[in-house]
Amino acid sequence: MSKQPTKTNGDANHKPPAIVASAAPPAHLAEYTDQAGAGTSQAAEDNLVPLIYVLQSNSPQVDRRSPAYVEGAEPGDIWLRNAPKGLEIVKGEEGALVQPCYFYRDVGEWIPRDDGGGFVGRHNVVKAADIQGAKQDPDDKNHWLTADGTHDLVETRNHAVLVYAGGRALPYLIPLSSTGHSVSRGWMMKMNDKTITDGPNRGRPYPSYAHLYRLTTEQRKNNEGTWFALVVEDEVWASAEQAAAGRKLHDQFKSGEKVAEAPVEAAQAPGNDAAGEMGGDHIPF
């Protein structure tokens, strides 16, 4: 039987921020409830979920001279793109409180950095080899190319999460590729270690959104350079309200109601993906 974490939402020192409910609407708006949704869109393309980025020393977001500079950003910080003012930058040593809600794998297609770089799109497959005509680099078995050999194919493990910050629950996606796969697998082990102790589902893992985690960053180094990577630690069990919010985001991703936005320019150490993990030079991010 897996050992259960001892923290609960009753721990004064570890209680995560509550989800702040909006004020009740004025009474006169009740007459418009028969027009629910008018003037809004629930289409996935109009409700794109932003990505989480780990900033590196060469990220434009940390360069004061760059038009992409984000106030207060430093290497090793976590960037919550499009977050409300004052919440965009999370210091890496402090970390972000997140609730994993949905997981899926896909393959990203990229223009090589030497050809200008840039994101092309996502393939709804698990392995690059599943893409028609994909070619394996004879010099690197982990490097795959499109059939014409012009674009890189990058296998990615994606975690849809709620980030708790400033009294809000903000939906984000964490894409992990290359050595980021090890971060993703380690996180999945933590989730699967939290098993139900009684009833018909005894021994099976709780849903991912039953627990919250702390994401911090740490500096790593190899012969390709130095970079900051994510570290995942257990934090606290979700409250009933948080679990309900997590299940909602899970269902929205599963149904396709919500999808991730395309990555934006966020220059990183050689071979980094959006979440700041190190890979081969073929990864154009």
Image (cartoon, helix red, strand yellow):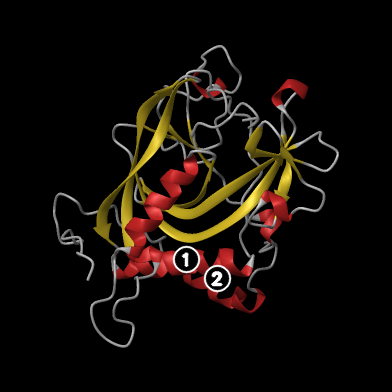
Is the residue marked by circle 1 packed among few (<14), some (14-19), or many (20+) residues within 10 Å? few
Residue at the extreme bottom of the image, as rendered: 200
| Quadrant housing residue 279 | top right
Question: Mark number for residue 25?
Answer: 1
Q: Residue at x 59, y 23 (%)?
A: 68
Residue 179 position (above or below residue 202): above
Question: Mark number for residue 29?
Answer: 2
Residue at the extreme right of the image, as rendered: 148
Q: Identify residue type, mark 1.
A: Pro
Q: Residue at x 29, y 31 (%)?
A: 93
Q: For this view, does 226 lie left or right of residue 147?
A: left
Q: Residue at x 25, y 52 (%)?
A: 235
Q: 216 or 87, which is in the foreground? A: 216
C-alpha span from label 2 to label 1: 7 Å
From where the camera sits, is residue 54 visible?
yes
Residue 40 position (above or below residue 111): below
- Mark 2 vs 1: CB contact within 8 A: yes
Residue 230 position (above or below residue 65): below
Q: Secondary structure at mark 2?
A: helix
| Quadrant housing residue 207 | bottom left
Q: 191 or 267, which is in the foreground? A: 191
